[in-house]
Amino acid sequence: MTTTDDHTGTQGEQHLEVRLRVNGMPRRVELPVRRTLCDALRQDLGLTGTHVGCEHGVCGACTVLLDGEPVRSCLMLAVSAEDHDVTTVEGLTEPDGRLSPTQQAFVDCHGLQCGFCTPGFLTTISAFIEENPEPTEEEAREAVGGNLCRCTGYQNIVASVLRAAEIQRERAAEGGAA
Amino acid sequence: MSTRSFGEPVKRVEDPRLVTGKGRYVDDIGDDRTLHAAFVRSPHARARIRDIDPFEAYEVEGVVAVYTWDDLEGAAAEPLPLLIPHPDLTHPRTGYALARDAVNHVGEAIAMVVARDRYVAEDAAGLVKVDYEVLPPVVGLRKAAAAEELVYDDIPGNAAAVSTQAYGDAATAVADAPHHLTFEWDIERSACMPMEGKGVHARWDAHEEKLTLWTATQTSTGVRGAVSAKLGLELTQVDVVTPDVGGGFGVKIVHPWPEEIMVPWAAIRLGRDVKWTEDRREHFVSSAHERAQLLTVHVGFDDDGKVLGLEVDILHDHGAYIPYGLIVPINASTQLLGPYRPGAYRVTFTSLYTNTVLVTPYRGAGRPQGVYAMERTMDRIAQYLGKDRLDVRAANFIQPDEFPVDFGLMFQDGRPLRYDSGNYPALADKLRALVGWDEFEKVRDEARAEGRRVGIGLGFYVEGTGPGPYEGGHVQVLTSGKVKVATGITSQGQGHQTAFAQIVATELGVPFEDVIVTTGDTRRFGYSVGTFASRGAVMSGSAIALAARKVKERTLRLAADALEADPGDLEIVEGMVQVKGDPSTAVGIGTVAVLSNPLRYAFDEASKAATQFSGGPVDYAKPPVAPGEKPGLDETDYYSPPYSTFAAGAHAVIVETDPETAEISILKYAVVHDCGKMINPRIVEGQIHGGVAQGVGGALYEIMAYDEAGQLANASFMDFLMPYVSEVPTSIDIDHLETPSPLNPLGIKGAGEAGVIPTTAAIAAAVEDAEGIPIVRMPISPSELFELRRAARLDPLVNTMPGTASVRWVDPASVLGGPAATTPTISTESEARA
């Protein structure tokens, strides 16, 4: 992390150069120290898939994975992500372009309507099914208990969690067979 | 994928894009050169502005401009438009793009700061000094109605409108009825609260003198008209593009929001892209709310519970301004009737100013309030007569052979309230089976024997959907064989791109995957009204179907020339035109599109067929484009209905209330729904799920907690209790009825709002049934229920239905074998349970 006081000639705002890995790629970005991680991802790195719904850590739309763990990127300063691995919704897609199990499950189960809260659900659920590949419906419900959605009434999101785990198991079996 | 996809639960074409982060919402637009706006908003509910001093804000490095009302000129400085005038709206008042000399609610925009980034803009906004003379605010319906304090000195009684509609002599009918009762029903404020707030991005091209505005709106053409009028531009100088929108639910149909004027206004003056993205607190205090109404009902009925006369007086809180006119109270006062036709009816609403955020339609748009009053009244009639609640409703249902039913009232679209079709007894039969109505008494008794409290509630509704004036559709077959479709309405998650592609694939006979739909872009379709009132599928769906039929007719005619066949002998199968049953004759519709456009110059292999020496059969007596024909295989058509089409449905809910904590849990939720022919049942069910969740929020959790000073005390997601997954029913049982509408070519009715409409009524009834205590005020929280229990025990008079001392309610404690009703201790609850 390099301090560049008044690097851009702006008064009052301290800038820092931050190095982080985003979706597997090393990125280096210079930004004001007060910039939140979600704003840095969206504005400085052009990854607009992460959405900001409340800016106070309640809705979960901005959830990204930090070293594989879900975090609210609106509650975290970008400089705090120095040397960490960040995964956004863009990074969930398989390397060959195929939808991830969670992404595919949302398509299969009509797990989204407007799509605004969806990236936060997708990151959260992706981490969850890694940890719990065979969730019960109750566990699936619990897993999405911290994310708000105003469109779906959650019925198809819970179904999507179960379907995501199922697809992940199917793909693991295919992978194992191959 | 089959071409006959209408009616199939196909997966949405929108989703692969949205689940991979490739959606494009308004805040996703812009680059490093884009300037960012922040607004200075009033901290007071009612104040005069003595002075605004932006000097310190200008001192902040990175600030480009600070604007106040004094900077505005022309129409931009005039009040914002009254969108829907009405003869009864005698005292309309709208706000300004920036407050002129007064503010009338907390959150009203006063100044705009434009800066290098949003952080800097907000820093500077905090430094704009505003000198206020604070005035006493009017908050709450009762205070507004009492009018001891006025929101506007020149508006007597705080009333923007007093409006009466009636058929028959309701007062006499009530008075002469064998039985009559009076109730007051009270419903609180809530709000749409989409996950994405509002947002605007403006780009001014000084060379072309053209403005492009991206905005999270429910009406791109409405914004276009309003912005061009306010900024002094010709309509053709403004394009409004609605990108992906993160939910609307009504709040985004209002336009122009102050920011939709100010952001392009600044972009034109600064010659730079300017954007503004609403934050959550801004959304709470400056975007519209809804619901708050007090409804007083006088009902007269006979021994069967048939309503002979009904008089309703509604107090409606519309907040500080009334740009959207009287739509919400008109809906409440007409749709209150639901599936019933009382012998005589009179309704009067008074629309009152308060120093709070304006009130405009939120999903349901007045219907939840009206349905709440009517359905609870039906419950009370049944209770009074000792009859089954479903039986009393059945005694009042409009029968299937009575349609069309014209009430002699005017609906919210300015046209007669005229039900086109429906089958309400069939809905009731389905609901009875789905929820297990007939078995429930046994369930309740068994639960009570175990010390548990369960109750069941009902809510029936009729919803006028698909109001005019019109929508249009453009369907174009490209030479590639792909079909491009455009319609003016915007999308906020309804799956329009999928549903409209299903319609076109089915009408035209092309693969579903080949149909690509654009919505809400004035560059593609300039004539439109907007997405509201459950009208998208009905209006644009019908228009697109009509346009597709015209394209089909022309395709067959053009192909007939090429195949030297009669158009009547041709069919389109999977995008190929062929003689019926003879695939060997097949010609792709892309080829027909080539032939439809006579060319001089070939631009690729396929287009050679349309050039002048291509050697096909030519009738030299006719010009290449025959009279009455036109080049290209595309058609536009419009759909404009004489009346709205009326969908209907019924909900039933079983709740359990905790004897100690008064927590209210939903055990079962059942929905029977009739939106005519369904285009995509998967999407319809998704709409119902979402509506029910919002209904549950409105019934049990969501209020706008204004204090006496007009401060919104719960303006965050921490404090405004929007349902998480833990608050919604674990399953929603849905059954469908499909009563086609005779009004449109597809037989469809709207489905978007239905899920939310009867939810408050049904849940209130279920809690009342579980508790044996009258529930009149919604939403109801556990602590409110706890207090109602206590009050019911302390004061036996409370334990009667309002307006009638003749009906005594069974004390839940006595039902449960506990101490007598009047035992004045809190501990009786747990004792009763024990």
Image (cartoon, coloured by chain):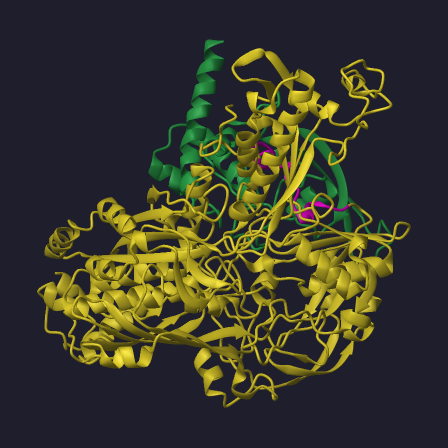
Chain colours: A green, B yellow
Q: Quadrant of residue B224?
A: bottom right
Q: Nearer the viewer, residue B765 or B560?
A: B560
Q: Residue at x 42, y 41 (%)?
A: B677
The reply to whether residue B443 is visible in this rendering is yes
Q: Nearer the viewer, residue B795 or B265?
A: B265
Q: Residue at x 74, y 23 (%)?
A: B594
Give, as a single range, the part of the protein colored magenta.
B14-30
Instruction: Look at the picture and state if A68 lies above or below B759.
Output: above
On the image, the x and y values in percent for residue B761 come to 33, 62
Q: Nearer the viewer, residue A89 or B482?
A: B482
* Residue at the limit of the structure toward the bottom, as seen here: B148
Horizontal side of residue B236 vs B592, given as left or right: right
Q: Is residue A146 magenta?
A: no
* Residue at the limit of the structure toward the right, as seen here: B207
Instruction: Look at the picture and state if B1 lies above or below B391.
Output: above
Horizontal side of residue A30 vs B416, given as left or right: right
Horizontal side of residue B707 vs A142, given as left or right: right
Instruction: Look at the picture and state if B801 lies above or below A10.
Output: below
On the image, the x and y values in percent for residue B94 come to 64, 74
On the image, the x and y values in percent for residue B644 come to 48, 56
